Image: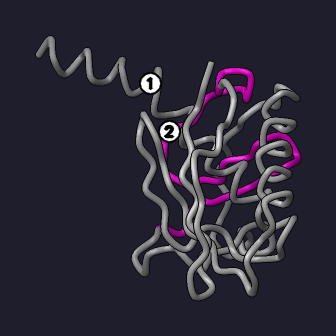
């Protein structure tokens, strides 16, 4: 039982910041490249990766700009809020293409200030000031897929 409490506490401290930064990264990629949110994501405490479908390989300058913009949003100390919206109304606000077929009629929408809104059941920080800073580790582009690996630093 002690171990379970420790795991819950551990997750609250480290997983929610990484999951929240994934939302910011997704919205940044959508805004910069006009691509959909990540096609595939592996979000972990120490490092994570996201895949995006892009028409052409971004330059090193563009990738540096992604990192800069993600950190700019984090540094705005935006509130992260949750609301419940009927699925029939949520489609006007968020992309519903990744929803499972058995999703409930009420959806949980996570908002990061006015920057991003996403249907999500995951755990998040309550303010972007709790994230730390986003650091891109590596990226590669193959056959229309950009894979980014990143971590959070204090």
Magenta span includes 151:
no
Residue in the picture at 56% in, 81% down = 142
- Percent of width and height locating residue 124: 57, 36
The 10 Å Cα crowd at callout 1, few under 14, some 14 to 19, many 20 or more, is: some
**Residue at the left extreme of this rendering:** 1
Which callout, 2 or 1, points at the residue further toward the start of the chain?
1
- Percent of width and height locating residue 122: 48, 46
**Residue at the front extreme of this rendering:** 60
- Colour approach in the figure: one colour
Which stretch is magenta? 104-131
Residue in the picture at 63% in, 85% down = 144
Residue in the picture at 78% in, 33% down = 74
Element assignment for label 2:
loop
Q: Is residue 86 left or right of residue 28?
A: left
Q: Nearer the viewer, residue 18 or 61?
A: 61
Residue 114 drawn above or below residue 139: above
Residue in the picture at 64% in, 45% down = 136
Element assignment for label 1:
helix
- Percent of width and height locating residue 111: 74, 46
Residue 56 drawn above or below residue 2: below
Tell me which corner region of the image, top left, top right, bottom left or bottom right, holds residue 61: bottom right
Asked if labels 1 and 2 touch by Cβ distance under 8 angstroms, the answer is yes
Q: In this figure, which residue is indicated by the disc labeled 1? A: 12
Residue 92 drawn above or below residue 45: below
Q: Which quarter of the rendered picture does the N terminus lie within? A: top left
Residue 63 drawn above or below residue 86: above
Disc sitting over residue 123 in the figure: 2
Q: Nearer the viewer, residue 77 or 80?
A: 77
Rounded to the nearest whole Å, what is the CA distance between mark 2 and mark 1? 8 Å
Q: Nearer the viewer, residue 88 or 10?
A: 10
The 10 Å Cα crowd at callout 2, few under 14, some 14 to 19, many 20 or more, is: some
């Amino acid at each position: 039982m002690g171990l379970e409490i420790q795991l819950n506490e551990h997750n609250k401290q480290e997983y929610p910041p990484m999951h929240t930064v994934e939302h910011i990264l997704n919205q940044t990629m959508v805004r910069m490249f006009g691509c959909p949110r990540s096609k595939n994501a592996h979000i972990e405490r120490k490092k994570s990766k996201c895949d995006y479908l892009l028409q052409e390989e971004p330059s090193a300058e563009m990738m540096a700009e992604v990192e800069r913009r993600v950190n700019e949003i984090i540094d705005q100390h935006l509130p992260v809020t949750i609301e419940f919206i009927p699925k029939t109304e949520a489609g006007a606000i968020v992309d519903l293409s990744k929803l499972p077929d058995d999703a409930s009629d009420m959806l949980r929408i996570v908002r990061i200030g006015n920057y991003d809104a996403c249907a999500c059941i995951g755990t998040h920080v309550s303010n972007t000031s709790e994230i730390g800073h986003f650091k891109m580790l590596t990226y590669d582009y193959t056959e229309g897929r950009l894979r980014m690996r990143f971590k959070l630093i204090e």
